[in-house]
Amino acid sequence: MSDNTTPDRPNRFADPHSASPEQLDTGTYDTSRTEVAAQQARHRAGIIDDDGRPITPATEPREPKGFLDRYFGISEAGSSIPIELRAGLTTFLTMSYIIFVNPSVLGNAIDVGPTTFAQLLSVTCLAAAFGSIIMGVIARYPFAQAPGMGLNAFFAFTVVLGMGVAWQTALGAVFISGVLFVVLSLIGARKAIVQGIPMGLKLAITAGIGTFLALLGLRTAGIVVANEATLVGLGDLKAPGAWLALIGLIVTAVLMQLRVTGAILWGILITSILAIVTRAQVYSGADGAMIAFPGFTDGVVGMPVWPADLFGQMDIMGALGLGLLSVVFTFFFVDFFDATGTLTGLAHRSGYLDEKGDMPRAKTVFSMDGLAAMFGAWMGTSTTTAYVESASGIEEGGRTGVTATVTGLLFALALFIWPLAGAIPGAATAPALILVGALMMDGIRHIDWDEVAEGVPAFLTIIVMPLTFSIANGVSIGIISYCLIKVLTGKAKEVHWILYIVALLLVARYIWLV
């Protein structure tokens, strides 16, 4: 039997760990896609050197030492406590904007008096802390959670302000959708859907999330802006946020190229210091205008405001009314495919998907996503979900639940030192999102672009995510187009039966619920 070895094509069945990162990055070594992703992630995180060898004994897979190591599988993942701590901090810094943005968005629809913003800020931190900690401690994955952007806008502007639904009833709809998440996760439906998605689409989902992250970063920096004539356009590069982000981008990229430990974290901190020192107007003022760093006028420590007017206010019975079922299912569908796509992409990026594309402990992972949504609604915020910004911590080397747990604990700490988190401007985290987005594109070279039935759905998955500003839309269009092309070209049997059911449900959602 031939081993497929030629001078130009090494043995594709050889031990993947014998390939150097250069071989993996240039495609001269053809091994399994998941091994490629795992090797590249370890290389870029500074865990292995250019020859594929562990950089230090501390990061070499070894026998676990102590309960913490055994429970989280830190050594088994080739990580270490310092790496996990740094990764958790990096994830928190790239997500910390939600502490202030979520209250601003929800505050348009929720008004409980003078302390509305403070209560919503507390709820945001509590929901993010709970969601991230249970994902880390119970599911043992490095995926942080927080109230989702987009979902909070749908909650505030479409459901409450647009449809005239009471915010308490809207919270009830979020809670019910969370219950549905948990039920479908426990019976294995979400795991089955992930298993039914072909590897080409999974690689495309990862790359699509990368483009989405990059767009988030470019928009935050003001480099990409809205344009009525062309939809999007180039922003003012002389603006403080743009030039600061560009400097941060170059600095961080150089640190990454030089294999500096904690390059992304250092990039965020250096850019933040530069913003403070230069008095760049990249911080949001009380009236929404951009100002220079105002300093810690009220100190860096303050007592949180308990969300007494939000806690337990959800109206479940009202949400179960026939007229609001479409709202419940819209919350459900959007977050279901948004979270499923995010978790699948992050799992692939961190090297957790096996050769079949399956995710270990999938039921637990997806259940924690639903439980976080339920808890968030109970506390008084819109849907809590997995965050694509978790990819920044993964690129820093985070591979276990310790990363997400640290992120969650930092959100809990932010209840008391949220002014300190405010010293990190969006212009400082934007470079991290752009660079992580670039790194997440590497898997597309393993997609079979010569096969139209594989390449076109993959392309649509990647491009629709940023253009519609929705991971869920990218996943949905990719699945629908994949099924249609396979059926119309006589290859229907190549598609998992559950994917047809999902495609039909997605088509129904676009026809009747959108």
Image: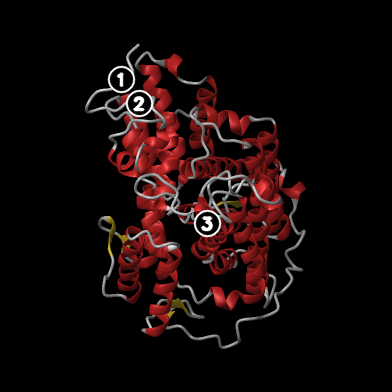
CB contact under 8 Å: marks 2 and 1: yes
Give percent across and percent down for residue 452. 30, 26
SS at badge 3: loop
Q: In the displayed image of the protein, which residue is found farthest to the front? A: 57
**Vertical placement of residue 162 versus 271, above or below:** above
What number is the disc on residue 4? 1
Q: Which callout, 2 or 1, points at the residue further toward the start of the chain?
A: 1
23 displayed left or right of 332: left
Looking at the rendered structure, the kind of residue marked 3 is Met
Q: Is residue 506 left or right of residue 134?
A: left
Dot 2 alpha-carbon crowd within 10 angstroms: few under 14, some 14 to 19, many 20 or more: some
Out of 13 and 54, give the one closest to the viewer. 54
Instruction: Characterize the local packing of mark 3: few (<14), some (14-19) or many (20 or more) Cα atoms within 10 angstroms.
Output: some
Q: Is residue 430 above or below residue 504?
A: below
Do labels 2 and 3 touch, CB within 8 Å?
Answer: no
| Residue that appears at 65% across and 67% down | 120
Return the disc, 3 or 1, that comes first in the chain's sequence.
1
Q: To which residue does mark 2 refer?
A: 12
At label 1, the amino acid type is Asn
- Residue that badge 3 annotates: 149
Q: Residue furthest top?
A: 1
